[in-house]
C-alpha cells in the first residue's frame, strides 16, 4: 500500500484526519471528566494517570489543527468531539456509580417497614423524631453507595410513597455500615496494606 499517496490524498485530509480529531477529543474530554469526578470522590491515585493520557491525546489532536489552520472541518471535528466527550464522560461515570451518598427521608407515616428493609439490606440507619409544619415526623438518615440509589428509592416509594427525601454526595465516609462489597478502585489500597504487613 502506498502510504505517501494516502497521506497526501483528499480522503486523508477531509475524512480520516477530521475523524481522528473527533475521536481523540471524545477520548481526552471523557478522560478529563472522569479525572475531575475521581478527584471529587477522593480517588486521587487514578487522577494523575488519567491526566497523563488526557493531555497526550489532546496534544495529538491540537497538533493536527495547527498543521492545517485553513481547514474549517478540523475545527468542527474538534468542537464536536469536545461536546460528545463531555456526554460520554458523564455516561461512563453514571455506569461506574462511584462513591457514596447520604439519603435523608422525612415521613409523617409509620416507617418501620422501610427501616426494617434498610437494616435487612445491611445499611446503617439513624432515626430522629422531629417536628414538621403540621405534625411530628420521622427523620431517617442512611448512607448508601451510589449504585444502590435506585434500589433504596424504590423501597421508599413502596413503603412510604408520600415521604420526602433528599440525596447528597459524600466525599468521604468512615465507620459506616454498608452491605459487604468491595469497589474496584479500593483494591490497590487493600493490596498496599497487605504488602506493608508482609514487610513488617
Image: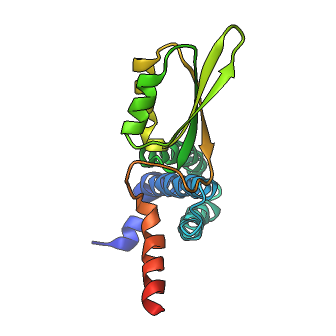
Residue 157 location, x and y as percent? 44, 19
Q: Against 128, is 62 above or below?
A: below
Q: Residue furthest left?
A: 1
Front residue of this view, candidates 70 and 57: 57
Residue 163 makes an appearance in the image: yes
> Which of the two residues, 189 or 38, is positioned nearer the viewer here?
189
- The colour mode here is rainbow
Residue at the far top: name it: 134
**How many labels sit on residues?**
0
| Residue 16 percent location from the top left of the image | 42, 56
In the rendered image, the vertical position of residue 176 relative to residue 53, given as above or below: above
Q: Position of residue 9 (x, y in %)?
A: 42, 61
Q: Nearer the viewer, residue 99 or 88?
A: 99
**Which quadrant would residue 128 be assigned to in this image?**
top right
Residue at position x 63%, y 54% in the image: 40
State whether residue 150 appears in this view: no
Query: Residue at position x 62%, y 18% from top?
Result: 137
- Identified at 51% across, 48% down, the residue is 89
The correct choice, above or below, for 74 with respect to 153 in the image is: below
Which residue sits furthest bottom? 200
Quick check: 149 left or right of 40?
A: left
Q: Quadrant of the N terminus?
A: bottom left
Question: In the image, what residue occupies the spot 53% across and 51% down?
Answer: 176
Where residue 43 sits, quadrant-wise, is bottom right
The quarter holding residue 103 reads top right
Left or right: residue 130 compared with residue 9 = right
**Camera-side residue: 118 or 161?**
118
Amino acid at each position: 500500500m502506498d502510504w505517501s499517496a494516502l497521506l497526501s490524498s483528499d480522503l486523508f485530509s477531509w475524512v480520516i484526519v477530521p475523524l481522528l480529531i473527533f475521536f481523540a477529543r471524545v477520548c481526552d474530554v471523557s478522560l478529563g471528566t472522569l479525572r475531575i469526578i475521581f478527584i471529587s470522590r477522593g480517588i486521587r491515585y487514578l487522577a494523575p494517570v488519567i491526566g497523563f493520557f488526557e493531555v497526550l491525546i489532546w496534544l495529538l489532536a491540537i497538533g493536527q489543527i495547527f498543521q492545517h489552520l485553513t481547514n474549517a472541518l478540523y475545527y468542527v471535528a474538534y468542537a464536536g468531539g469536545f461536546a460528545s466527550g463531555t456526554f460520554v464522560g458523564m455516561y461512563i461515570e453514571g455506569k461506574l456509580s462511584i462513591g457514596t451518598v447520604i439519603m435523608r427521608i422525612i415521613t409523617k407515616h409509620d416507617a418501620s417497614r422501610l427501616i426494617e428493609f434498610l437494616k435487612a439490606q445491611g445499611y446503617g440507619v439513624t432515626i430522629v423524631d422531629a417536628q414538621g409544619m403540621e405534625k411530628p415526623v420521622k427523620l431517617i438518615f442512611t448512607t448508601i453507595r451510589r449504585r444502590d440509589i435506585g434500589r433504596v428509592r424504590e423501597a421508599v416509594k413502596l413503603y412510604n410513597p408520600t415521604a420526602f427525601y433528599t440525596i447528597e454526595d459524600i466525599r468521604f465516609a468512615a465507620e459506616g455500615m454498608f452491605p459487604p462489597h468491595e469497589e474496584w478502585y479500593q483494591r490497590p489500597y487493600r493490596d498496599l496494606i497487605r504488602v506493608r504487613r508482609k514487610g513488617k
